[in-house]
Image: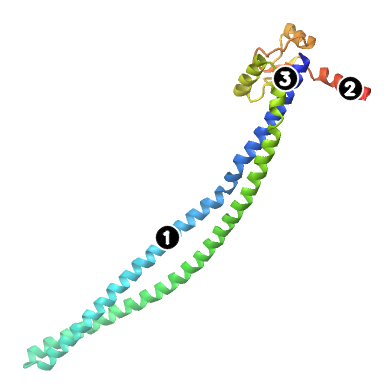
Amino acid sequence: MKDQLRYLQQLQTIDTQIQEIRQSIASVPASLAPAKDDLAKLEAMLAGERSKIEETEAWRSEQEAVVNREQEALKSAKGKLAEAKNARDFSAASREIDNKKRSIHEREQEVLKLYEALEVGRERLAQREADVEKLREHVRSEEAKFDDVLKELEGRAALVAEARPQVVSKLSAQLMARYDNVTKRRGSAVVAVVNGVCQGCHMALAPQQSNLVARGETIEGCRQCNRLLYRPEDFESEEENASEAG
């Protein structure tokens, strides 16, 4: 039974290593998530700024069109002034000309402000686009590095897993079923008993079961957590004997 326990320990070591590597693999994309989130937020901000610039350009075009219409109306008013035949017509045409000139001036000032705002907005947008592109390049570079890391981790996992079938072949089907069942439920299936206490759930074993573990004639399962139990000193003494014999 000690041989079976030893193989179980070897199997658990292999499975633990594989699990740790798989966790490392899972953590690789997660470590890049903050940078990707930042990039997504900045790209959304850029899209918003581009939209505002487009709206400003559309408004500027509308104002320029209004100026053009007002200038045409000013020409018409000047024509009326030239054709005025009496003081009333002359006064009305003069007021219309003044109103058109004032409207044109106000519109032109508005268009000028819009041009200035657009220039500032485009410069700011260009700078932010450059900053976002740097972040994109950083993310692409990190993704390339992570691809290499993932390949290396996958290779390590495959290498460790190569030893698993050989160990499994040395275990009985019944014992493997127990091992798999406890591993799924508890994470670890094989634990030591130290001073009569299960190191998996830290509960004291009944004296009778503790004696059975000490005899090593059967593979005992903790009655609290069902983990498979062994005494470290049994294997330590065997390793010391093997070392002395060597």
Judge left or right: residue 215 versus residue 23: right
Residue 188: image location, x then y, percent: 66, 24
Residue 56: image location, x then y, percent: 35, 69
Residue at image position (63%, 20%) is 182
Quadrant location of the N terminus in the rendered image: top right
- Of badges 2 and 1, the one in the foreground is 2
Q: CA distance from mark 3 to mark 2?
A: 21 Å
Q: Amino acid at mark 3?
A: Lys
Q: In this picture, is 133 found above or below 244?
A: below
14, 216: nearer the viewer = 14
Marked residue nearer the N-terminal end (3 or 1): 1
- Of badges 3 and 2, the one in the foreground is 3
Q: Residue furthest left?
A: 86
Tags 3 and 1 touching, CB below 8 Å: no
Q: CA distance from mark 2 to mark 1?
A: 71 Å
Marked residue nearer the N-terminal end (2 or 1): 1
Residue 33: image location, x then y, percent: 55, 48
Q: In this picture, is 44 found above or below 68?
A: above
Q: CA distance from mark 3 to mark 1?
A: 62 Å
Residue at image position (57%, 59%) is 137
Q: In this picture, is 161 found above or below 127?
A: above
Residue 123: image location, x then y, percent: 47, 71
Residue holding disc 3: 170
Q: Secondary structure at mark 3?
A: loop
Residue at image position (60%, 56%) is 141
Residue holding disc 1: 47
98, 117: nearer the viewer = 117
Residue holding disc 2: 242
58, 101: nearer the viewer = 58
Q: Which class describes the residues within 10 Å of circle 1: few (<14), some (14-19), or many (20+)?
A: few
Residue 199 at least partly seen: no
Judge left or right: residue 132 versus residue 226: left
